[in-house]
Image (tube, rainbow, N blue to C red):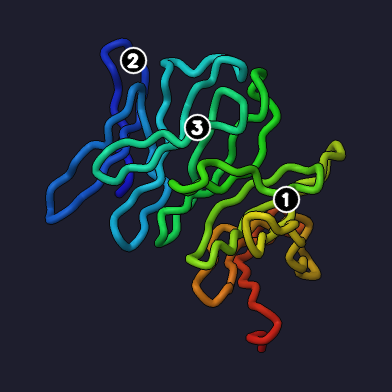
Amino acid sequence: MGEYRYVLPNGTARYQAFRIKDGVRTDLAAVSGSYAAAVNPVGQIASTHRRLEPPGRASQRTHRAFLEDGVITELGTLGGQWSQAEGINGDGHIVGQSALGADGVLAGGYIWSAEEGMRRLPDAGGLAAPKAVNDDDVIAGTHTCTAAGAAGHAAFWAGPGAAPPLLPDPATGTATMANAVNAQGEITGWAEAPDGSRRALVWRPASRSS
């Protein structure tokens, strides 16, 4: 799965999500461009498509997260006009972000399942940006405090209803981000140094630390 870029006759660039199976490429249906974020072992794809072209102001953005599983299932929102998908696990549970209100500015992290729909992740009054989820519904991502100029920090959710503790920062890191979690609960991401350079990181559960 992935996406390719093409240009419309009016000069507007658009991205189109697709899957490849048995050597055959199939475009994922989309209203106005789409991108594919993640695929699970059974071939379900977490994606996002746009409903308007061009997207316009924050209050006019209407891109929506969707599940592609032979058919397109939009995931809805947390009350605003847009949502986007970032990760999916083997059970088809999807994580991402969604606008909270009509202005499209404030956003919250979510987990979605076919059984319970979209649920907001606890964020302790900050900004939750989940990026990945494993089959135990352990979620990895970033949490940012609401204070102006606050740096984002890698965080994890032990489950959909759990508060997000921050992952330890390396001694030289000023900001961190988590972007993947495996079946053992090991989380990967990166840290930004004071000079702006980035270094890859892995966080392991205490019982597995070396």
Q: Say what secondary structure mark 1 lies in.
A: strand
- The residue indicated by pointer 3 is 76
129 and 76: which one is in front? 76
Q: Earlier in the sequence, mark 2 or mark 3?
A: 2
Mark 2 crowdedness (10 Å alpha carbons): few <14, some 14-19, many ≥20:
few
Residue drawn at x 61%, y 25% is 80
Q: Is mark 3 on a helix, strand or loop?
A: loop
Q: Where is residue 17 in the image (x, y as percent from the top left)?
A: 32, 38
> Amino acid type of disc 2?
Gly
Residue type, numbered disc 3:
Gly
Residue displayed at 41% across by 59% down? 91
Judging depth in this view, the residue of 185 and 118 nearest the camera is 118
Above/below status of 97 relative to 156: above
Disc on res. 11: 2
Dot 3, how many residues are within 10 Å of its Cα: few (below 14), some (14-19), or many (20+)?
some
The disc label shown at residue 143, or none = 1
Mark 2–mark 1 CB contact (< 8 Å): no
* Residue occupying the point 80% across, 70% down: 171
**Mark 2 or 1, nearer chain start:** 2
Going by the picture, which residue comes out furthest to the front?
Answer: 115
Name the spot of residue 175 as percent of width and height, x first: 74, 55
N-terminal of the pair, mark 3 or mark 1, is: 3
